[in-house]
Amino acid sequence: MKMDRTSLKSHYDKLLKDEDFDKLDLGLKNPNIFQILRISKNEIRHSNFLSWLLDPNESHKLGDIFLKRFLREVFSSDKFGNIDQVDVEGMDLTKVTIQREWKNIDILIVLENVVVCIENKVLSKEHSNQLMRYREIIESNYPKHKQTFVFLTPEGDTSESESETYEPISYEFIVNSLERIISVYGESLNQQVKNYIKDYITIIKRELMGTDKLTKLSKKIYQNHKELFDFIIEHKPELVDDLSKIMKEELSKRGWILGSENKYYVRFLTPEIQDLIYYNNQTKNGWNKRESFLFEVVLYPPSNKLNFKTVLSPSDPNYNTNRVEEMLLEIDGFRSSKGKKWFVNIDKKEKFIYEEIPSMTDKEMKSEVNQFFDKITPIIKLVENKFLEHKEELLIMKNV
């Protein structure tokens, strides 16, 4: 879409005169603890807050109100024939245990003779047979308990792999339950707790369900100023652009040396091993600067992770890449590569919410990047030490 400066200014003036735009601006300025802490789409933080609400012994002073509502919903499913919602009334909920990340299970509710396994999916999808693995873990560890399984998603999606076992529950149910609690028990709740719950309801509606009043107002404004917003969207920077730029700046400050790169990959070497690395002369299947080895950071927004790897590229026939891999495999924690051409011997992932990039200052992004670099530095040092241990051999191989 093309738009000259005069047309852009005209559209912008119309937007500024739109009363709905002022309402949206005012609404977005209302503080929300989950947005302030930048955890509105963080799966782990959602699970933490839900666990807090589910635990009747926690500081919210709700007792077992939310837990009972949740259990009734789960037990109403015909998937669990050995238990139903009526059974909740006879349960001693004071002895419940709420566990987080036990054997990688998001939330585990353990009662005297019942266990509820909850897999919480906010942005990501199920993968690697994880639901089946969690079911087998529960069956193995709680053989005498009545076993129930929940697949919690924003829209109540059915599991693709375990639809017969996992009961789908939506965040709409969570919202409805919390709104009912606020309506009925609001006056007796601690004001701070009530504010937390209200903020949580708002953030679920806005970020996960798209149903809060500001979301609806945003859609109305978009329809009224579609041409302007389409132009802005078309020219907005990619999420990884700023991150990649800052990552390259910060690694250079550490004295690391940029290698071959492209949009979603930042690659580098360190001065300690730069002279030990072979550069290909013949093969055209490797990187553009022809390095045979690089440290690599993968920037891939859908994963919500920063992914650090050591990578050996396809090399000239006279260079023994397999021997270099043997050196790397002497390091504890390094594994044989599954690839036949590109060898990856370590793959370390760290959580990073790419959608938060637009709201981050350069200072905040630099802090995140340097925290990540601090975590991978010990691995880099191990590689440096290993290559230096084999320095003479690597130099001979390089000069063959």
Image (spheres, helix red, strand yellow):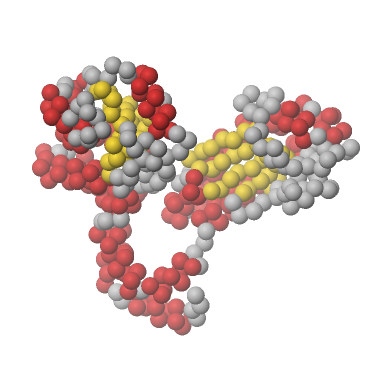
Q: Quadrant of residue 219?
A: bottom left
At 33% from the left and 71% from the top, the residue drawn is 223
Does residue 327 show up?
yes
At 32% from the left and 33% from the top, the residue drawn is 165
Q: Position of residue 305 (x, y in %)?
A: 50, 43
Q: Position of residue 397 (x, y in %)?
A: 85, 34
Location of the C terminus by quadrant is top right
Does residue 195 show up?
no
Left or right: residue 66 versus residue 361 is: left
At 29% from the left and 74% from the top, the residue drawn is 18
Q: Position of residue 315 (x, y in %)?
A: 78, 42
Residue lying furthest top? 144
Q: Image height check: is 347 above or below 285?
A: above
**Residue in front for this viewpoint, 81 or 134:** 81
Q: Image height check: is 56 above or below 231?
A: above
Left or right: residue 153 versus residue 3 is: left
**Residue in front for this viewpoint, 186 or 97:** 97
At 64% from the left and 34% from the top, the residue drawn is 338
